[in-house]
Image: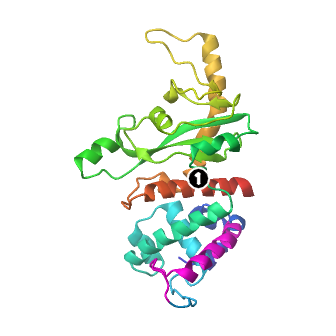
Amino acid sequence: MNYERIKGHPTNFVSVTGLTIAQFDVLLESFELEWDMYITHFTLEGKLRCRRSRKIVCPSLPTTDYKLFFLLIYLKTNPLQEQLAASFSMTQPKANMLIHRLSDILRKTLKRLGELPYRNEYQLEHLLKSCQHVLLDGTERPIVRPKDAERQKRHYSGKKKTHEVKNNVLTLPDRRIVWLSKTYQGSVHEKKICDLQPLLLPKEITLWQDNGFQGYNPEGAIVCMPKKKPKGKKLTEEQKQTNRAISSTRVIVEHAIGRAKRFRIIKDRFRCHKLGFDDLVMELACGLHNLRITLT
C-alpha cells in the first residue's frame, strides 16, 4: 500500500480514503498539530512520558500523512486487521494499537475543526436558533452476533432480523449532521431513544420525521410526519399527496446518513469488540461527512 503512488491517482485516492486530495490536505494540517501535541506528552502505547520526547520513526508509517492515510483506509474500506497490517508491513497487534490511538487523535482533529456533531441534546436550542427546518431519523448498523444469550437479546432487531446497534441523527437541509445520539442496542426503538435523550429545539422550528417517531412531539416544535394508514382503511388521495411531499423533503436526512455510510466501518458488519469503539467510529464518520460538506 504505497501512499505516494496512490496519491498520484486522485480517483484511487478517493476510493480508498473517502476524501479528495484537497480535503485530505486540509484535514492533515490539523491532524499534525494534534499528533505533535500527543506524542510530546505520551508514548505510542499511551503511557505518560518521563523523558523529553524525540522524533519517532515508524518504518511502516514514517510520517504523519502516512498515519492519517492508514486510518482513513481502515474507516473507508473496513478490512480485516490482518489484511490492513499486511498491506503496511506490520503485525496485527501493532495495527490494532495504531487504529485505536489514531482514532482518538482524529476525533480531536475533527473537534478542533468544528466538524463533529453535537452529542449533548441540551445545546441544540442555542445551536439551531437561526434554523427553520431540521430532519430527524434513526440508523442501524449490523454487528457480529454476540455469544452471550443476554447480549444477543438486547442487540437483536426485529425490524432487520439481525443483531445491531442504533443511533438517531439530526440534520440540517444542507445534509450537515448537527446532532448524534448515543449508541444503543438494536432492540431499542428510535422513539425510545428520543425519550431517553429528549431534544430541546427552538420554538416554531419545523421538525421532519418519519412514522417511526409516532407520538414524539418536542415542545414548541412544528412536527411534519407522514399520515399513518388506519387499520383496515385506506388513505385518501389528498393524504397520499401530502405524504409524498413530506417524504420528498425528509429524504434529505436519508441522503446524509447514506453519505456518512460511505465509510464502510459503519455500513458493513462491525467486528471490533472494544468498549465504546462502535460509538467512536460513528462519530468519526459523521465528522468526516461534515468536513466534506464544508470543503465542497
Residue 41 lies in the magenta stretch: yes
> Which residue is the extreme one toward the right?
130
* Residue 143 in sight: yes
**Residue shown at the point (48%, 47%) measured from the top left:** 182
Across and down, in percent, residue 204 comes to: 71, 28
Residue 279 placement, left or right of 131 = left
The residue indicated by pointer 1 is: 286
Say which of 120 and 268 sits in front: 120
Could you tell me if residue 9 is visible in this image? Answer: no
The image shows residue 175 at horizontal and vertical percentages of: 67, 44
Q: Is 260 contained in the magenta span?
A: no
Q: Residue at x 64, y 18 (%)?
A: 241
- Give the residues in magenta: 24-50
Q: Amino acid at mark 1?
A: Cys
Q: Which percent across, then down, holds residue 258?
A: 57, 46
Q: Quadrant of the C terminus?
A: bottom right
